[in-house]
Amino acid sequence: MVRSTGSWYDVRTDDGQLFACKVKGNFRLRGIRSTNPVAVGDRVEITPTAVPDRTPSTTPDRQTATTPDGSPSGLPAFITEIHDRRNYIIRRASNLSKQSHIIAANVDLACLIVTIAHPETATTFIDRFLASAEAYRVPVALIFNKTDLYDADERRYLNAVMALYRHLDYPCFAVSAETGEGIMGTGPEDALLPYLLGKTTLFSGNSGVGKSTLLNRLVPEARAKIAPLSEAHDQGQHTTTFSEMYDLAGGGAIIDTPGIRGFGTFDFGREEVSHYFREIFAIGRDCRFSNCTHTHEPGCAVLQALDNHEIAESRYRSYLSMLEDEDESKYREKF
Ligand SMILES: Nc1nc2c(ncn2[C@@H]2O[C@H](COP(=O)(O)OP(=O)(O)O)[C@@H](O)[C@H]2O)c(=O)[nH]1
Ligand SMILES: [Mg+2]
Ligand SMILES: [Zn+2]
């Protein structure tokens, strides 16, 4: 399934045909209460509901079966079966909601697109994304966009932030979607596109960081709408409402997702949070208590490492903020 408008699901068959589908029957998913039964990236079985009696007069110029306003232009069909998911990424349907929304399924890689400035992406936001991806067991990479805009100070900061995450073994790419810097290249070590080939990659990030611009550079046919940064807030506006999948010419696909603010810190237990911060998890094995929360306990190896600057303060702050979230959600459940 490559795109959903809420009422239709666009499905592309392996031989490239497009269908505008409705869901047949009731898909209740084990263990998840989800607002969308079928997610972008899902492999599905379909039954066409009409035999084509004419060849379409125009080929759709997007890779989808419905027009941008959401009305169907592909052949009608029913989705009759959803194959088991290798993985999926969810977020809460809304704040306080117990329902979840599946952002994408069957992804090989989740890329968070971030900017050091114009607008600035908070490191807590990056860390939350990384922790969630660890929890979903989806490999991640960080893409630092808008390198063409940075002054000397911002470049230094960019290099420091990339060094921090590379040290934690997260692949990092510095690119400019505007100029193309860092995108084409000879191998996955030095450029983004070769790294993405053959993978189904989820693109995520705050609005305004250049997701659509980057997507258009990687997949020119995508023609994703680019939102001018609003002068007043130096922040993008929401233009993408639904996830959508685009094929890369050299193999693989990109799933463009709407700007995700609170990327699912869903279902984490309090003790679990530290498992999703790689260095805190590794160092925490040396704590005196096996159930150490790394906040106040005597003999805490994490607090010691923080003192020695072996753990970055920004990472530890993100860890604390996620612990606090868990406390809050427990509080909510009781009342
Ligand atoms: N200078 C510069 N501007 C960029 C770059 N990438 C995106 N932009 C601009 O940032 C704004 C938001 O881009 P958009 O792709 O809509 O962001 P999205 O909300 O993440 O999809 C637009 O004005 C783009 O032209 C870049 O690499 N360099
Ligand atoms: Mg966009
Ligand atoms: Zn500890």
Image: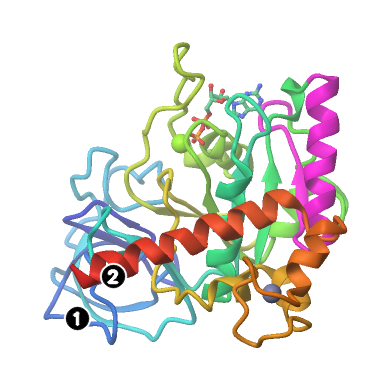
Say the numbered circle drawn on residue 223.
Answer: none
> At x 75% / y 29%, what residue is drawn?
147
- What residue occupies the far front of the structure in this picture? 298
- Residue 80 rendering spot, x and y as whole percentages: 21, 81
Which residues make up the magenta segment? 151-179
The answer to whether mark 1 and mark 2 are in CB contact below 8 A is yes
User: Residue 27's mark?
Assistant: 1
Q: Check the image and report above or below for 81 versus 104.
A: below
Q: Dot 2: few (<14), some (14–19), or many (≥20) neighbours within 10 Å? A: many
Q: Is residue 129 visible?
A: no
Q: Which residue is mark 2?
A: 38
What is the secondary structure assignment of the residue under circle 1? loop
Residue type, numbered disc 2: Val
Mark 1 neighbour class, 10 Å CA radius: few under 14, some 14 to 19, many 20 or more: few
Quadrant, the C terminus: bottom left
Mark 2 secondary-structure assignment = loop
Look at the image and tell me whether residue 177 can be seen. Answer: yes
Q: Position of residue 263 (x, y in %)?
A: 45, 55
Q: Amino acid at mark 1?
A: Phe
**x, y percent for residue 284:** 72, 77
Compare residues 4 and 121 and report the one nearer the observer. Answer: 121
User: Which of pointers 1 and 2 lies earlier in the amino acid sequence?
Assistant: 1
Quadrant housing residue 85: bottom left
Looking at the picture, tell me which residue is in the foreground, 193 or 73.
Answer: 193
Q: Position of residue 92 (x, y in %)?
A: 32, 60
